[in-house]
Image: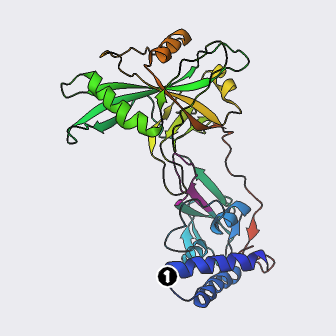
Amino acid sequence: MSRNDRAEQNAARRRAERTGEPYQDALAAVRAERHLLETERRYVLTEDVRGWLNGKGWRGVTFGDIEPWSWLATLKPRYECDWCGDDGDARTQDTTLQCVVTAFDPDLSPMTGLLSARRYHAACQPSKVDWVRNIDIPRGPVGIGLPSSVRPDVHGEFALTVRPVMMPIEDEERPEPALLISAAVTEDHGQGEVPWLSELEVNAWWPAGFGAHDRPDFEGLYVLRAVAEDWSVRAVRGYPSSTCPEWAAIRMSPPEDGQRPDHLWLGGLDFPQEWIDAARGRDTITLLAGPIPIAGEVPEIPEKPERDLLAQLLEDGALLTAAAPFELDEQAGESAPEGEPRRFWSTDHGLMG
């Protein structure tokens, strides 16, 4: 079976599932559209455009309510070139297609989709897929709310801050990176910080798997027993965005195509090189969460806690700890490569190949 046949059959199955028509009818319709494009349209398409129209790179969603080749076949052949503004006719002139597509990202855009399509005279612009990336990544604290266990209609409000830190161990050959999650109460309904931070401990950190840390051995060996269930962490460097090339996502649910994970926190971070070097090659990361009230007092966590202070906070029980699966995503920021153009009105090349 050729690639053309497989692509036709896949397109027919998607069409039949979407419309409810019999598979053989859907296959006949797909083949009729292919014949129309091969014999009556002069589209000059690159390999990346052909791949996209065949479903390559689709994540989470399909093209929409219509198969992409059906959409292309049913477009009126006459158009206004989106480059020069002159009239064009895909029946008599070489015509190119630019697809503007959301780029997949498991945390920012967990699905791909066609944002727009432009047609040009082939002499004006080549065909291509233009991948658009979400660059709206916030910086600074993230606000969350938590209902009171006594009065569910009353919500405390918090500001979460995440910082990359190094664990206070003295093994220079095994430096351990961590992410420190600090919560500040911004709305306490007159009750003060302590009860709301205790609510956060009991109803957020404990159910997630965070636990009190056994007295750590700061001279070397450091073992985490608590594990954040279903949580994971992704740290990104080199994201193709001039506004926020470094950021991190702390997920409370697994990422899935077509659906964003539940994020505890997603935002821009500046990672020290020491932290990045220590994080490379790791498949888990330490999460520290606090402050945890002690004897009715709220320990202070400064903006840049030194390792000695972290050691003291851990020893005092002011921070809970957990391990979570970790991915360090160092991106090159390159877009999808363009292939060589092909003429789909020519009988030398198959439409779905």
Amino acid at circle 1: Thr
Residue 270 shows in the view: no
**Which quadrant of the structure image shows residue 59?**
bottom right
Residue at the front extreme of this rendering: 214
Residue at the top extreme of this rendering: 308
| Closer-to-camera residue (275/295) | 295
Q: Does the magenta stretch include residue 104?
A: yes
Q: Mark 1 points at which residue?
A: 19
| Closer-to-camera residue (28/39) | 28
* Residue that appears at 36% across and 17% down: 294
Q: Is residue 4 left or right of residue 290?
A: right
* Residue that appears at 39% across and 36% down: 204
Question: Colour scheme of this structure image?
Answer: rainbow
Q: Residue 142 placed where, x, y %?
A: 39, 33
Q: Residue 20 placed where, x, y %?
A: 50, 84
Instruction: Give the overall secondary structure of the magenta segment.
Output: loop
The image shows residue 177, relative to residue 307, as above or below, that is below
**Which quadrant of the structure image shows residue 4?**
bottom right
Q: Which range of residues does the magenta coloring cover?
A: 98-114
**Which quadrant of the structure image shows residue 29?**
bottom right
